[in-house]
Each structure stands twice: as C-alpha cells, then as structure tokens.
Image: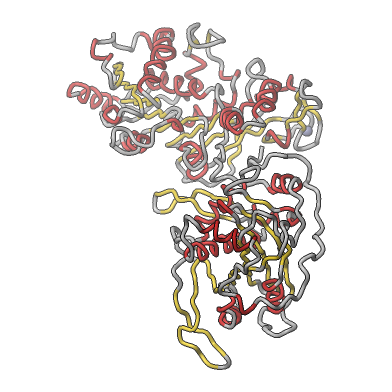
Amino acid sequence: MADARAEYRAAFCEGLRPPDPMTVSQWADAHRMLSRKGSSEPGPWRTARTPFLREPMDCLSPSSPWRRVVLMFGSQMGKTEVVLNWLGAVIHLWPGPALLVQPTLDMAKRLNRQRLDPLLKECPVLAELIAPARSRDSGNTMFLKEFRGGLFVLTGANSGSGLQSMPAAYLAADEVSSYPLEADDKGDPLENAETRTSTFPMGKVLITSTPGTRGACRITAEFESRSDRRQLAALMPCCGAREVLRWREHMKWDRPDGEVWCQCPACGERVGQHHKTSMLLGAEWQASAQGDGITAGFHLPGWYAPAGWHSWELIRDEFLRAKADPLLLKGWVNKRAAEAWEDEALAKVSADGLMTRAAAEPYASGTVPAGVAVLLMAVDTQDTWLEVSVWGFGRGEEAWLCWHEKIQGDPADLGADGPWAQVDVIRRTQWPREAGGVMTVRHCGVDTGGHFTQEAYEFCRARVREGVVALKGSSTKAAPALSRGSKVDVSWRGRTLKGGLLLYLVGGDSLKRTIYARLRRDGAGPGSVHLGQNATEEFCEGLTCERLVPRQVKGFQVLEWQKPSGARNEPLDLAVYCLALLELVKRRYNRATMWDQLERAATGGVSALPVAAAAAPAVAVDGTAPPRQRRRSRGGGGSSFVSSW
Ligand SMILES: [Zn+2]
C-alpha cells in the first residue's frame, strides 16, 4: 500500500485547489452517459427524468454545506445513479481519495463489472483520466483505480482489512442495511468506513439503502436519528398543493384489478398516474426534523417512480399478494414503502386481531374454561378506581382471561363501602368451571406502586394468609419476572410494623415480551392466550397499546416499552402481574409435576388453595355475573399478526 499512500497524499494536495463550482447534477447533465450495459434508458443522463435526485446529488457538491447525505429509498429508485454521478464528478472535477463500500466483496465485484467499468469507459471525460488497470487491481480484498490527482477504492463491508486500508475524502456506503454487524472482528463496518473520512474536513459521506428490520436497520437509524428527514412533496395537478403521498392514506383503487389513483391529500380530487411527470417536476423535498445539522436525509417510496418505471398498479398487485404473508409483506414494506419492517418482537399487536380471534372462543365472562388449573388475580391501583383481572392458567401456561372489572371508588377507603371490599368479593368468588365444580383465586397480587401504597400494604398485610401478595413494578431493565420478596414496613392499626410485609418486584420488561409474543399465537395449546367474552374493545386496546421502541443510550441501542400518551394500559399491567404470580406458584411445586398436581386438585374437587383454605367460605357474588357487552371488531384484519399496513 506504500505507493497508494503517496498517491492519495498527492491527491489530497491537488484537492486544496478551490473546487469547481459545478454541482453534481450539472456535471451529470453535461457529461454522464448511461451505458447500454447498465441502463434500460441508454444515452445522455437527464436529471429532469428523475428530478427528485437533483437535491440529494447537489448536497454532495463541494459548494453545499451538508457533510453527510442519507438516502432511504425504495429499490430501483436511483440510489446507485447518485453514487455513480457523484463518483464521476469527483474523478473529473474534485479529485481526491474515494472509497465505495458495498455489502460484500462479491457485490462490489458485480458493481464494478456492471456499473463502474461502463461509467468510466463510456463517459469521455472520465475515460481519459483513468489510469490503465494494473494487475494488482484484481486483488481479493478490494479494487483500486487511479486517476489524475486521486484514487478510488471499491470494497465490501465484509472485508475488515478493505475498510481499514486508507483515509478517504469521499465515502459512498451503499446498501448499508445489508452490511454485517461486524467485519472480521474489526467492529462496525459503517463506523470504520466513516472514520476513514475524519481527516478531511471538507469530506463528504453518502449513505444509501433500502431499509431492513427496525432496530437492526442502519439506514432507518441514520435517517431517523441524525438526518433532517426530508419527504418528497409532489405538486398536485388538481389544486397546486405540494403533498407527501402515503400508501394507506392516498393510494386508492376500486377493484383489485382496476386502475390505481392518488386521492389528493389537499383537495380530495382523484389524480391519475399520467400526471406523474408534472407531479415530480414540481415536487419539493420537505424537511420534517431538525437533525444533527450536517446530515441531509431523503426518504423515497416506490410510488414516486417516474412514468414508465414500476407503475402504481404493479406496486398495488405486489401489495395485495404480500398482504397475507408477513415475509412477503416485509419485502414490500422495505422495497416499495422504503420503510423499516416492524419485527414481531418489536411490533404492535393488533387489538382488532385479538377481538376477531376472541369472537371464535365464546366462553362466557365469569366462567372458568376446562383447561384452567389455577386462577390468579391482580389489582391495579388508580387514583379514583381499582382495576382487576382474573386470569386462569393451564398446562404449558396456556392462559384464559376469566374476569375483568373496573371498581370505581376511593382507594383510600378500606371500609365495607370502599372499592377494596369488592376486591375481596371477587377474590373469594367461587367461579363455575366449564368442566363442572367451582374454582377460587389462588393468589391475588396488588400493585402497591401508585398513590395509595400504605392502603395497599394494609390490605395485603391483613390477607397474607389468603394468598394476597404485595407487588411493585421493578425499575431495573433486566429484572427477573418476580423478585424473591423483601420486607417493607407497614402501618397496622395505628402503629408501624417494621418489616411487616413481603414486597415482590415484578420484571415487566421481559414479561411484556412474553405476553406480546404469546398474543400473536393463533389457536390453542401451550402459551396461547384466550380472552373469550371478556374481550371488549377497551380491554384489547389496553392490552396491546405498548410497543418496543429502539432508543440510543450512550451510543448503544436499547429497546424500551412505550405506550402512546393517554393510552390506558392497565389490562396489560394486570396480565403482567398475573404472569408474575404464576412464578410464585411455580416456586412451590416441582416443575415436572406442577400441572399434574394443579389439574388433579382442580378436577378432584379438592381445594387447590392450601394457603387460602381458611378464606374459602365467603361467596358474595354468584359466578354467573352477566357477560359484559361486546362490540364488534372495527372491520378488517382477521389476522392478529401485527403490521399497520
Ligand atoms: Zn388537489
């Protein structure tokens, strides 16, 4: 590499001349020839054919202040042309060391053969600048091309050594979502490549890709967390408004084989595809975020493709084919919508899907399905009400919601007229089993984390022998499902009992993952979740309102549970608490025989309540309370599998 080093130093010195004021798009219009080999439209390049590429290209010109350009594009929307035009202009006008990184060496080879060689041979101004290839150019970690005053290296992100070889004034990182997480144990390939540019204050970085899976997608992270998030606003022929076009909201069709049109977001007019050319010529990129001040980000879905490229009908047909299959749909969302795919573990579960599924399992509220071997109950303390869920669990932790209720009242009132009295009623109810007999709640967990901690403690303390336990959400991320229990002070009949109660911390983080994974399962069997007639719309919304969202913490990406502001997530919290209580049950049994024992106790008429035997007699409501009112699902999705598409 010694002579290469000397060459880029020379290149750097040449680069100190004031740069040519031409922009990349002007250069392309003046000099770029599209070859027969790599283009379906051979001949001179015309930026007017793909006007949305002008601004991204010009941000790469030395006259532009932007240092980094991020293109989150659908496939075949011109990303690579931006790379090639920039590279051509660099070689011709602003020579310096340039690095082009493809996901793999094989892809780099292919790009070299299909696009780069034709670019260099067929643009007359470039052909004369490129030195004839030497034998070492075909080295197996990279390709090296020399030109007057500069040097150009093409490599793969899977080659750690290729990425560490040279400083670069210009870096084009192509299809970064397909880069490996690490290259040859040498760390993050994108970061390594970008480090190459740090010694060039006037250097430029171009990062392009179709997106991948959210949370593991580099282009989405670049676009969302660093760039100014530009969206293309098309010029609407109907009313002259400039509007960003979204698939779900604006692209319409009557019949699956009919014409697709765009419903103008501004005036509602129906706009046909034949207007595309003028819509694109008049379009504007509109930034939607502050960004880091040096990164210009561009998001471009496939329905902005120019006339003659992939049509709206083609994209619709692909969409309809993909809709029912998460794998196909992921491809469509990445390649056409140019958006990150929400992976199962990260995606929102659909409330509609749960409603639809529950309609097919119509066991009544207040009855215990045959598979249930143990009933667990949780209480959430709010400011003006208590919220209660009773969940039944069976073999394989299959779960059935048996009761859900909001008990209005002041949680500070522990008396006979207060809401806690009703908690006792539910707790002691003998619920009728579908298979005959009755069953009572084995453990009741009370959330003590709200504004009524002492009242909740007091309630628990008086009922410890009846299986009531004090719970609190753990603030530690990787906390176990249920802690060992630690003693807390509790006020009791006017005095303080030191260490009078055991408080268990609940690891909601991992339990929510478990619950959301299980909610996606259809049918019966281990891990499946059933809601029956308890599945009101409000309950399903509450159960599904949270989602995992990636967030950067000190340079690391962490996933955090978030609920939309204003959403009521008590049904989810209560499910989390009941699943935590199941840990308490597991601790008292041999895991291998636990479900056998619980089932035998449930069916044998023997009380399954060793700890609560003393509390059994009170039967205050009959178990056949009226089933609650259900509302039909708001149309659509029989599938509970997630996506918002
Ligand atoms: Zn309009």
426 versus 630 height, above or below: below
48 versus 242 height, above or below: above
- Left or right of 434, for residue 143: left
- Left or right of 362, for residue 370: left
Image quarter hosting the N terminus: top left
Q: Is residue 177 visible?
A: yes
How many marks the image carries: the answer is 0
Q: Quadrant of residue 385?
A: bottom right
Foreground of the two, 597 or 363: 597
Image quarter hosting the C terminus: top right
Residue 428 at what x, y percent from top left? 68, 73
- Left or right of 15, for residue 576: right
Split into quadrants, the picture shows ligand 1 in the one at: top right
Foreground of the two, 46 or 469: 469
Work out which residue is located at the far bottom of the displayed protein and give it.
494
Q: Is residue 63 visible?
A: no
Residue 53 at what x, y percent from top left? 55, 25
Residue 355 at what x, y percent from top left? 73, 48
Foreground of the two, 223 or 629: 629
Which residue appears at 50% of the width and 11% of the height?
Answer: 34
Which residue appears at 67% of the width and 66% of the height?
Answer: 439
328 versus 43 height, above or below: below
